[in-house]
Each structure stands twice: as structure tokens, then as C-alpha cells.
Amino acid sequence: MFNSLSEKLESAFKNLKGEARINDLNIANTVKDIRRALIDADVNFKIAKEFTDKVKEKATGEKVINAISPGQLMVKIVQDELTELMGGEASEFNITGNPAVILIAGLQGSGKTTFTGKLANYLKTKKGKSPLVVAADIYRPAAIDQLTVLAEQIGVDIYAERENKNAVEIVQNAIKEAKSKNKNVVIIDTAGRLAIDEVMMTEVANIKAAVNPAEILFVVDAMTGQDAVNTAKAFNDKLDFTGVVLTKLDGDTRGGAALSIKYTVNKPIKFMSSGEKMDTLDVFYPERMAQRILGMGDIASLVEKAQDQYDEEQAKKLEKKIRKNQFDFQDFLEQLQQIKKMGNLKDLMGMIPGVGKAVKDIDIKDDAFKGVEAIIQSMTPEERSNPDLLDPKRKLRIAKGSGKDMNEVNAFMKQFDQMKKMMGMMNKMPMGGFPGMKGMRK
């Protein structure tokens, strides 16, 4: 995410490396490189210039001139300005109403339908809501099919009228259906086009007028950069939407949309999304995104993802087993599976300060734990709960069952033993360092 922009900003800050003081010359050179990095990231020139003018103004303040760590101070100034540019703080999501109506708009291919499913899943699992998704794209049967599959996958109801070609009527009928079934949120997936046209805009505006939504979310493909910002402006002029959703942040995202869209339409970015999995939807925090762009990681989001996967009862049981040095292969397997639920492994590592840069060129696949899982799953329940049972004969059987050779099995066993020894050394310390422990609880 934003790797190219991060690298270029880091390069810009090198102008200050080794400098004892900030002065007019090194400020000018740094600011020039920052502006170039933003423009390369597909940020509008006017926005990039205004941004760097603010950075320059703050950097030439009397207190900064006399500072001892100019590099760190410049990074802090840029972080603050990036945060402000992207909205300052997270925006509230309005789900008031009976039912609350959420209208989803955007161009075809932006990820509207997938986001509709993700939002329904988010509201169901994290907000305790009972959502109804509505297939209001009357032009593409495939969109209805896709939403139907997603609704089944996450266990929510869908409303569709395949033969009805009146989108407003479909939506009005859906709200009646929601009330009759006690659904407290209705999420409407509207039709999109490959480009803006009057028919699409009028239809979405008519739906808005008919249902008075609590939220109108404009979904934008983050990979389209400045084009996305221009499209957002056109939609906002017609719809006056309440917030923006950035999708496909796992792709080759230059950053232009995230950095420019709030400035252009003066509407907050409310969610960001990556991948196709239904649980890969996050509230957008401008400060956290600024930290990630500057290579500082995002520990707060990482902890939140961990908290979503662990409950207090599970944490207590695991803590007792570690305290008694009874942590076994089954426990290890369950921990791996919890980590996998947190999302894309490379994205998770990128949230750790300093790690994102180290792994940016490494292909870390989501099935990175597959070999270890295969080894553990080839054990009997008795072997999983009692690692000391694993003699050479049993290991050979496990190797054959998992499709691994003996060296791989022995290497894993050795790593597991080392991990248990480390846990034993930490037994007298307060818990909190292990996934699922006190520091990770809800």
C-alpha cells in the first residue's frame, strides 16, 4: 500500500540526514522532493503545492529552526499535514433510522457490490445489526448473482426483483420488506457505468429522493488515482454524498485518491477495503494512514484486528496452559488459524513499525502457514496434545501424511521446542506479549 510514495518521501527526508539545524536551503530541497513525490503519486498539482507550502511555513518557524533533530521534526510536520489532508480524524458512521438506509454509489468496477457485502458483514459482526442488502442494479444480472452469493456467504438476507426494471420501486419494496422482517439496516447496491452518464446519475438521485438515506457512500477504486477524484466531484455535485470508501488498497495504489479526495469534495473517507474476503473492511483513520505512508506502521489497527479474533475466555485458557508449560501443537494450530483470520499476512506485517519496508519486495502468500498446518493436521489428537510422544517412527508417518520430508518435520519440531523454552522463560513475567493474552483482549 503506497510503497512508491513512502519510498520517495523517505528519500526526501534524507536531505536533512546529518544536518544539525533546519535552514532555508535544506527546507527548500526537502519540500521540493516532497512535492515531486506527491505529484508522482497522482496528487493534483494545486493540492501538492498547497500541502508543501504549509509544510514549508511550519518548518521555517523559529522553534523548528532552533531544533536539534530536524529530520524527525520534518517527518512530524509532514505526518500532521498528511493527517489533516485526509480528514484529520475518523468520521462517524450514521446508522440511525428504522431501518437505517445506506445508499452505495460509484462507477462499474469500483467494487460497489463487494463493498456492499463487506459493509453488511461489518454491521452484523461488529455492530450487532440485522442488515438487508438490496440488489438495485437493474441492468446487470451478474451484479444480482454476485450479491446473492455474498449474502449467502455472510449469512444475511437479500432483496431482489429480477424482472422489475424500476430501481426506485425495488428499493421502496425492499424497505417495506425490511420493516416486516425487523431488519434495522438496508444497504442498497445501485447500478454503475464504465463512465459517468446522465441516466445513471438521475437514477441514483431518484433513489436518494425516494428513501432519504442516512448515509450515501461513494465507492472509489484507489488504484485510479486522480481520475477517481474527478469522478467523486461529479457524483458529489449530483448526490451530495456523506462519505467515501476506498477499495482495492491491496493493489498498486499510488495514493492520489486517498490524499486528494477529502480536499476536493470536502467529504470524509469513512472506510477502506482490500481484497475479496468479507472481513477485510476497516474504518479509515487519517492519522494511522499517515503513519503507514511514512513507514511508521500502524500498531493500533494491528491490535484491533487481534482483539476481534480473541475472546477473554479463550485468552484465559491459553494463558493457563502457557503458565503450566502445557502449550501444545493443537494450541499452536489454533493460534495460526486466528492470525490468518486477521487478514492478509503481508499487510499485517506492514503494520509493524520498520517491518513494512523490509518485506515490501518479498512475496508473502496467505498460505505461508500451509506447510506447518499440514504437519500438525497429520498428527493424531494424542500427538498434538503431547509433543513428547513424537519419536522417529511417528515423525516419519507425519512426514508422509503431510507431504513433507523428515528434515522439514524435524526443523518445525525444533522451532516449536525453542518457542516452548522461550515461553517457559517468560512464565514469571506478566502476560501480554502473546497473541490472545491480556494486552489483546476485548
Image (cartoon, helix red, strand yellow):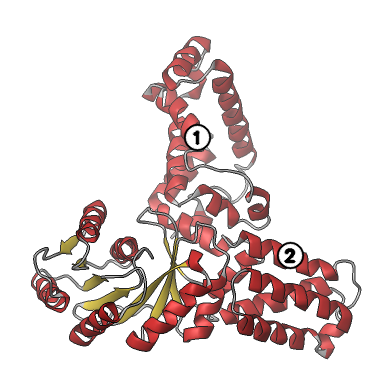
Residue to which mark 2 is pinned: 10
Residue 377 as seen in the image, left or right of residue 193: right
**Mark-to-mark CA distance, 1 and 2:** 42 Å
Task: Inspect the image, locate mark 1, and give the three-letter code of the amino acid beneath it.
Answer: Phe
- 4 or 327: nearer the viewer: 4
Is the residue marked by circle 2 packed among few (<14), some (14-19), or many (20+) residues within 10 Å?
Answer: some
Task: Look at label 2 and name its amino acid.
Answer: Glu
Locate residue 34, reporting x and y percent. 72, 74
Q: Is residue 188 above or below residue 365?
A: below
- Mark 1 or 2: in front is 2
Q: Earlier in the sequence, mark 1 or mark 2?
A: 2
Q: Nearer the viewer, residue 361 or 345?
A: 361
Apparent side of residue 210 relative to residue 177 in the rendered image (left or right): right
Q: Is residue 353 visible?
A: yes
Residue 282, percent across and down?
A: 44, 65
Q: Position of residue 382 (x, y in %)?
A: 39, 22
What residue sits 54% from the left and 53% below the top?
348
Quadrant housing residue 162: bottom left
Label 1 packing within 10 angstroms: few (<14), some (14-19), many (20+)? many
Name the residue: 49% across, 24% down: 387
Instruction: Give the answer, above or below, for where 242 lies relative to 422.
Output: below
Q: Residue at x 34, y 87 (%)?
A: 238
Question: Foreground: 302 or 442?
Answer: 302
- Whether residue 296 is visible, yes or no, is no
Label annotation for residue 385: none
Residue underneath mark 1: 327
